[in-house]
Image (spheres, rainbow, N blue to C red):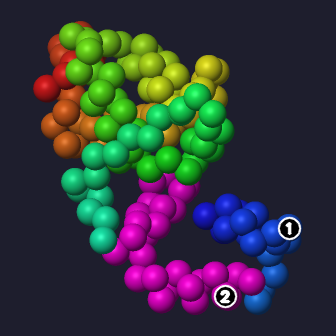
């Protein structure tokens, strides 16, 4: 988040003063932080993570977002969309389909980790389950 904000301000290198200004602005915003793996996400006070149901996929003229910028809750919503069209999928197939949904053609460790967190979130919300053969099924 720092990086993206600094880019929008035209700041190429963060200083102690710019970090302090950012932290102060974040505190005033009353944003709520959540952790997922090594990533920290900030939610607006008005947003409810538990009922989040938005999935912003790649549009024709849009640039692909960095996978580290996509919250697991949003990936889970994408997984729910994918599974609405499928009876069952292997984990690898679901990883690939979710990657494509967000504009990725090649798997990377970061992408696999992010989608795995999305799978965990979708399972926790009761949208998917695993059958006795280890395939992912829609609930």
Q: Position of residue 65 (x, y in %)?
A: 60, 43
Residue 59: in sight, yes or no?
A: yes
Hey, which residue is sitting farthest front in the picture?
61
Look at mark 1 in the image and give the residue it sits on.
12
Q: CA distance from mark 1 to mark 2?
A: 15 Å
Quadrant containing the N terminus is: bottom right
Where's residue 74, x and y in %? 38, 44
In the depicted structure, whether residue 40 falls above or below residue 139: below
- Quarter holding the C terminus is top left
Tell me which residue sits at (50%, 47%) in the image.
70
Q: Residues within 10 Å of mark 2 (few under 14, many from 20)?
A: few
Asked where in the image residue 21 lies, by quadrant, the reply is: bottom right
Q: Which residues are magenta?
A: 18-45
Front-most of residues 76 and 61: 61
Expressed as whole percent of the image width and height from the top left, the position of residue 88 reads 25, 12
Label disc, if present, on residue 21 of the rendered structure: 2
Queried whether the magenta region covers residue 21, the answer comes back as yes
């Amino acid at each position: 988040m720092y990086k993206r904000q600094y880019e929008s301000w035209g700041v190429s290198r963060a200083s102690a003063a710019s970090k302090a200004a950012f932290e102060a602005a974040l505190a005033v915003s009353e944003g709520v932080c959540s952790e997922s793996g090594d990533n920290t996400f900030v939610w607006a006070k008005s947003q409810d993570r538990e009922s989040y149901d938005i999935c912003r996929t790649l549009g024709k003229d849009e640039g692909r977002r960095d996978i580290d910028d996509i919250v697991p809750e949003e990936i889970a919503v994408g997984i729910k969309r994918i599974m609405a069209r499928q009876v069952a999928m292997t984990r690898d197939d679901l990883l690939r389909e979710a990657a494509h949904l967000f504009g990725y053609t090649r798997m990377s460790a970061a992408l696999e980790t992010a989608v795995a967190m999305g799978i965990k979130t979708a399972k926790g919300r009761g949208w998917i389950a695993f059958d006795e053969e280890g395939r992912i099924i829609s609930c």
